[in-house]
Image: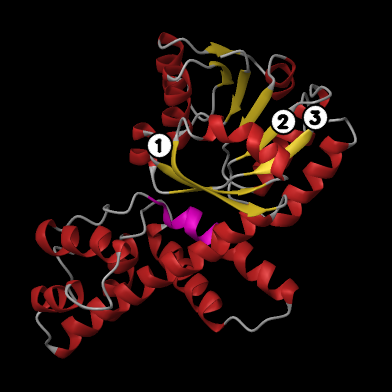
Amino acid sequence: MTQKIGFIGVGMMGHGMIKNLLEKGYDVVAMAHRNRAPLEDLITKGATEAATPKAIAEASDVLILCVTGSPQVEAVAYGENGFLEGVSDGMIVIDCSTGAPGTVEKVAADLAAKGAVMADAPLARTPIEAEAGKLNTMVGASDEVFAAIEPILQTFCENIFHMGPVGSGSRMKLINNLITMGQATLIAEALCACEATGVDLQRFREVISAGGGNSGIFQMIVPGILDEGDFEGMKFSIANATKDLRYLNSMLADAGIVSPMGNATHNAFVQAGKAGFADGLVGHLVKAQSEMNKVNIGKC
């Protein structure tokens, strides 16, 4: 491939994404994220290293961001040696982070002033699918930019949805998380309700699995908890879910709509974090609610 890909955010998701880019023939330059181990592994596979976001931008035709959220995007864009100092005319920046749509649009405007363009392409699914090249992404970009980046996204995504102009990908991702995290919250409450009222948990699982209440989220969370006491079936953290739901509720408040479920879901995740599960995964929401309700779910 002739395009050189810069990558900022070599974490659990980023490692798999870069691995797939390299396997499909792209040259990738990256920098360490929280620790060097993922980057060191990728260097053995052909990636190269740069020290700063500015240096990565200077060495790249396309720059991919995969950081935690809007504060981190702003830090690598506007901080010392930020990538905005290194972008060139015609460059494309793809933000795969989940952040506030307003931040995406702000960075896009500042890139446009330098002759560069931006797409927001937040991701769905987990690091497992990142390694397998089977992530989902929701893309906000012009038709021209989308056509230019689609082959790159295809290296690590199974399903690619062009949602509209810049910012629309981030809006869709937040609404997607309202549904997925809302389901997780209802599942946790329903499991506690079963245990408190004497409904057999395995029979509950059978009924839901055979009916309209079944979902991918249900199957990611419930079987592992009931069969093995494993609360880690959904590889997404309580902390990140809380952050995304905060962005969602801010977006919906700005839109002037009533969002009782968005606020209730956010509160459930905040409560789980305050109960000591901020570093846990979404399945630990069940553990947090079971402790609060003084019932035993799985092998709590």
Q: Amino acid at mark 1?
A: Ala
Does dot 2 land on a helix, a strand or a loop? strand
Circle 1 is placed at which residue position?
Answer: 130
Q: Is residue 26 left or right of residue 81?
A: left
Judge whether 190 appears above or below 135 on screen: below
Residue 292 seen in the current view: no
Q: Amino acid at mark 3?
A: Leu
Residue at x-position 58% and y-position 60%:
172
**Mark-to-mark CA distance, 2 and 3:** 12 Å
Q: Which residues are the magenta region?
A: 236-243
Q: Are marks 2 and 1 in contact (CB under 8 Å)?
A: no
Camera-near label (1 vs 3) is 1
- Per the image, label 1 sits on a secondary structure element best described as helix
Q: Which mark is residue 81?
A: none
Residue 238, percent across and down? 43, 57
Judged left or right of residue 126, residue 25 is right
* Tag shown at residue 84: 3
Magenta segment, prevailing SS (helix, strand or loop): helix
Q: Amino acid at mark 2?
A: Ile
Between discs 1 and 3, the one toward the N terminus:
3
Place of residue 162 in the rendered image (x, y in percent of width and height, measured from the top left): 60, 50
| Residue 136 visible to an observer of this rendering | yes
- The image quadrant that residue 192 belongs to is bottom left
Give the residue number, with chain letter if any, for mark 2.
92
Q: Nearer the viewer, residue 157 or 252?
A: 157
